[in-house]
Image: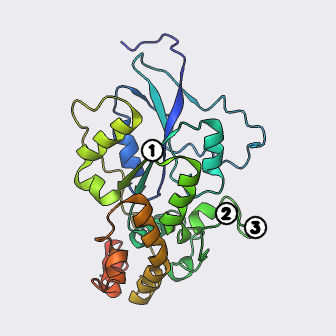
Amino acid sequence: MPDRRDLGTVPYTFSIVGVQKAGTSTLMAMIHRHPQVARSPRKELHYFDDESRDWTAPDNSDYVVPRRRPKHRIAGDSTPLYIFWPHALERMHAHNPDMRLVAVFRDPIERVFSQWSMNRGRRPRLTPDWPDYIQTERHATLPDALPTGISIDRYPALSGVIRGYYGQQLERGLSIFPREQWLLLSFREMLADHGTAMDRMTDHLGIERFAETPELLHKMGVWPKVEGTAPTGADIAGLAELYAADLELFARLSGIDVSTWPTRRILDGDLDPAELAEKLGTKIGLLT
C-alpha cells in the first residue's frame, strides 16, 4: 500500500537545462526511476523562464515537490530552454547557488532540423517553412535579452538557429555556476552507452548508482506528416559556417569530442553538405 503520510516536500536541487531535441526527455524519464528522486509534476516546469513572475522580489516557495516516499531525497526540473533563455540561469542561481546542472548536447544542424520538423508538424501555420525558418533570428551572437519584435510565446519556437550556439551558452552558464556543478553529456554517447551516462548523472547528483540500469526509454521521435521544403546542400553548408567558430569554443569549454558530429565533418571536408541534407529530408518524408 502507498505511504499516505504527510512527508513534506522535496526542494529542486538539480536541473536539466539543455538542450532541446537532444534526449532530455529520455534522460529525465530514466532518472525518475531512481528510488531517491521525487518525480516532478511535469517534465518541463518553465519556472525560471516565466516572464510573468516578479523577478525583482521572487517568491520561490512553490518550487518544491511533494515527498511521496520516505526515500525521496532530491527532485529535478528539466526545462531545456533554461541554458538559452536570457537571465534564466541567473534567476536559478539567485534561488539556489548550489543547484546541480545537467546539459546534453547534439550536433547543432541535426538539432535545429529536429526542432523545425517538430514545430512544423505540430503548428504548421505558425512555423515558417524551412528556408525562412533558418533565416529567422539568425544573429551572429547569442542574444542577452529577449527580442522586442517577436512575442515571448513564439520566441522559443522561432529561435532555433541561435539555440545552436552551444559555446556561447555554455560560456555564459559557466560564468554563473562553477564548472564542478555542471554535468555535460553528448547525445550520441548517451544513446550508445546510457549505463555510463546514468552512472555519471547519479554520481553528479550525489545519490546512489542504480542497482540495475533502467532501460533506455526512447522519448524522442520524428514528428509525422511534416509538410514543407526539404533542406538543400547550400542550406546545410551555410549553417555549418555559421556554427564554425562557436563549435570550436564549445569543444574547448566542454571537453566533448565533436569530431564525428556532422557539422564538424562538413567543416573539415569529410562530409558533403548535400548528403546530410538528403538524409534529413528523407528522414521526415520530404524526399523519397
When asked about the image quadrant of residue 188, the answer is bottom left
For the residue carrying disc 3, how many other residues have a C-alpha within 10 Å: few (<14), some (14-19), or many (20+)? few
Q: Amino acid at mark 2?
A: Asp
Spatial CA distance of label 1 from label 3 is 35 Å
Spatial CA distance of label 3 from label 2 is 12 Å
Q: Residue at x 74, y 46 (%)?
A: 52
For the residue carrying disc 2, how many other residues have a C-alpha within 10 Å: few (<14), some (14-19), or many (20+)? few
For the residue carrying disc 1, how many other residues have a C-alpha within 10 Å: few (<14), some (14-19), or many (20+)? few
Tag 1 residue: 180
Q: Is residue 141 above or below residue 181?
A: below
Q: Residue at x 60, y 49 (%)?
A: 89
Tag 3 residue: 148
Earlier sequence position, callout 1 versus callout 3:
3
Earlier sequence position, callout 2 versus callout 1:
2
Tag 2 residue: 144
On the question of residue 41 being in view, the answer is: no
Closer to the camera in the image, 63 or 228: 63
